[in-house]
Image: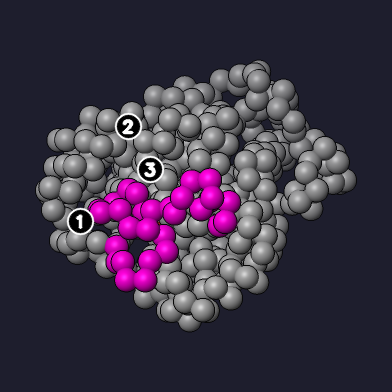
Amino acid sequence: MSDSRRELSEPIASADQAASRGTGAAALPDKTLPRALRGMLALDDFEAPARRYIPRPIFGYVSGGAETNASLRGNRAAFDDLAFVPRALVNVRARTQKTALFGRTYDAPFGLAPMGGTAMAAYQGDLVLARAAAEANIPMILSGASLTPLERVREEGPSAWFQAYLPGETGPITALVERVARAGYDTLVLTVDVPVMANRENNVRSGYHTPLRPTLRLAWDGITRPRWLFGMFARTLLLHGMPHFENWGPRVPLLSRKGERQRGLRDQLSWSHVELMRRLWTGRLVLKGILDKNDAKIARESGADGIIVSNHGGRQLDGAVAPLRVLPGIVSQAGGMTVMMDSGIRRGTDVLKALALGAHFVFVGRPFLYAAAIAGEAGVRHAIKLLRDEIDRDMALLGITTLAEMRRERLMDARNFNGFGRGGRSP
Ligand code: GLV
């Protein structure tokens, strides 16, 4: 157990408790919610309405993985291989899910993962996520592939972190680190699983390209999503002008006949650049996309404050292992470094399984983007509340009052059930 978890292991009767709780009253839709949200009872519920709202190529880009989607499916399957062993008759009245991370206490053990497509799917999407996260006192990570200047996002969402895509070149690294520091960020995340772009053949099939190409096909894709066309695209052009990719390399407009994103020498990025960043950046440095325990060890030795165990939501190397499966091995190499995880988390039970295997914190992506697209800030607030309520309810059902109690003994390997009571090995 890390120190920060231990810090919180005394039950705190708190504002946490005042927050609405899943105490069994979840049977009827909440009439106080906007109509679009009343049927949204779980994070997965946001996907179908988002598919109807967002033009096909953009939805395909956001929802898809790479090649055969093996990692995308594998991320979900990993959670099903674990089962809980709850304890009974524990007084769980004082349960809290507050989590200390990097010197700050968040109201939940999850944050919003970085997603570059947010502001092309949802009106002011990056700002919507940042504001909702700040209000809920959880972190939101702004993607380096986003369409909103990083300075603006941090102003409106003081709990935002910034995630960078960087080439292995000193000049761009130095310039970006200085810019992120000037904007007031305290946590910088470097994504390390993108030496080249993945084979996103789904994007080619659905007509997606960054930047978007103004073709007849794209026009048709927009016209067939009139709520997006007027409520998001036309509204954005009218009120804010053409969005640009703002946070890596030269600015490129979202819609461009010939423009290309400059990725630089990303395949040259290596540990020496992490060491350079460590020298330049005085805030928290996090590496995202680690799957090997040896890399976790090198990350620690290179001065990273934390890592996010991730296969990029199944969007990079198809067939890359589900982060949940390598988490225990990575935690064993982490020393004092904070280990976080993303990829495939959709339920409170998923969050708790990741924590039981040693993750200190987790991130969730796509469902929050879908929530922002279909219902803006209210949608994201609702999605955050759903996940928080699930965690709260699950903690009670498991018989725990703090997340520090979420240890491996609470789990068993459901694949190795041998028919004799609690036969499966603890993972
Ligand atoms: C960006 O991070 C992407 O996965 O497309």
Which element carries disc 3, helix, strand or loop? loop
| Residue 417 position by quadrant | bottom right
Residue 15 visible in this rendered orientation of the protein: yes
The residue singled out by tag 2 in the image is 183
Query: Nearer the viewer's eye, disc 1 or disc 3?
Result: 3
Q: Are marks 1 and 3 in contact (CB under 8 Å)?
A: no
Amino acid type at image mark 2: Ala
Which element carries disc 2, helix, strand or loop? loop
Amino acid type at image mark 3: Pro
Instruction: Give the class, few, some or many, for how many residues have Cα within 10 Å of label 1's Cα (few <14, many ≥20).
Output: many
Q: Is residue 153 magenta?
A: no
Report the span colored magenta: 233-261
Q: Is residue 235 magenta?
A: yes
The residue singled out by tag 3 in the image is 149
Earlier residue among tags 1 and 3: 3
> Residue 411 versus residue 96: which sits nearer the camera?
96
| Residue plotted at (72% across, 23% down) | 18
Residue 425 visible in this rendered orientation of the protein: no
Q: CA distance from mark 2 to mark 1?
A: 21 Å
